[in-house]
Amino acid sequence: SDCLAIHRFPFMAERRRSPGLLTCEALGLGCRHYQRRCKLVAPCCNKAFWCRHCHNEAATSSRSPHELDRTLVKEVICQLCGNSQEPGQTCTGCGECFAEYFCS
C-alpha cells in the first residue's frame, strides 16, 4: 500500500487493477522504478532525478558515463512544495510523505 498515493490520490488503489489509468510517473508520483514525491539530487552531476536508476539511464548516454551511489545523496527536492532538504521519509516543508519506505 502506498502511504502517499492512497492518502492524496485515492483512485491509485485502482491503478493495479485497471491498466487504462494514468501511471504514477504521469501523475508526478515518481518514475517507472519507484513511486515517490521527491527527486534525488545526484552529487556527481548536480541534477535532480526520480531515482538512481533514472540517473544511471541518463548518464549512460552522456559524454562521461557514470553511476549514482545512492549512499552519497545528501539532498532531495519535494515535488509538491519544492522544498530542498536532507533525505528523509517526509518533507520538512509541507509534511508530505515521500514514499512508504525509506532506506537510510
Image (spheres, rainbow, N blue to C red):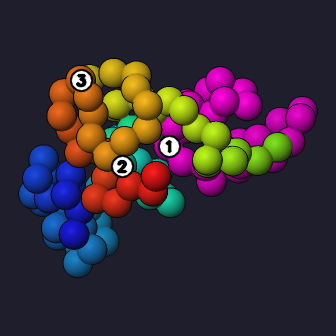
- According to the image, label 2 marks what residue? 36
Quadrant, the N terminus: bottom left
Q: Gap between marks 1 and 3, in whole Å?
A: 19 Å
Whether residue 57 is in magenta: the answer is yes
Left or right: 72 in relation to 51: right
Q: Quadrant of residue 42?
A: top right
Q: Gap between marks 1 and 2, in whole Å?
A: 8 Å
Residue 28 - label = none
Residue 95 in sight: yes
User: Which amino acid type is shown beneath numbered disc 3?
Assistant: Gly
Judged from the image, the secondary structure of the residue bearing numbered disc 1 is loop
Please report the bounds of the magenta region as a residue range. 40-65
Q: Depth check: give the residue in front, 74 or 80.
A: 74
Measured as percent of width and height from the top left, residue 59 is found at 76, 41
Is disc 1 in contact with disc 3, using a CB cutoff of under 8 Å? no
- According to the image, label 3 marks what residue? 93
Residue positioned 50% across, 60% down in the render: 33
Q: Earlier in the sequence, mark 1 or mark 2?
A: 2
Is disc 1 in contact with disc 2, using a CB cutoff of under 8 Å? yes
Measured as percent of width and height from the top left, residue 86 is found at 43, 31
Residue positioned 12% across, 47% down in the render: 8
Judged from the image, the secondary structure of the residue bearing numbered disc 3 is loop
Q: Gap between marks 2 and 3, in whole Å?
A: 16 Å
Judged from the image, the secondary structure of the residue bearing numbered disc 2 is loop
Residue positioned 45% across, 56% down in the render: 103
User: Which amino acid type is shown beneath numbered disc 1?
Assistant: Trp
Measured as percent of width and height from the top left, residue 9 is found at 14, 51
Q: Residues within 10 Å of mark 3 (few under 14, many from 20)?
A: few
Q: Is residue 8 above or below residue 21?
A: above
- According to the image, label 1 marks what residue? 50
Q: How many marks?
A: 3
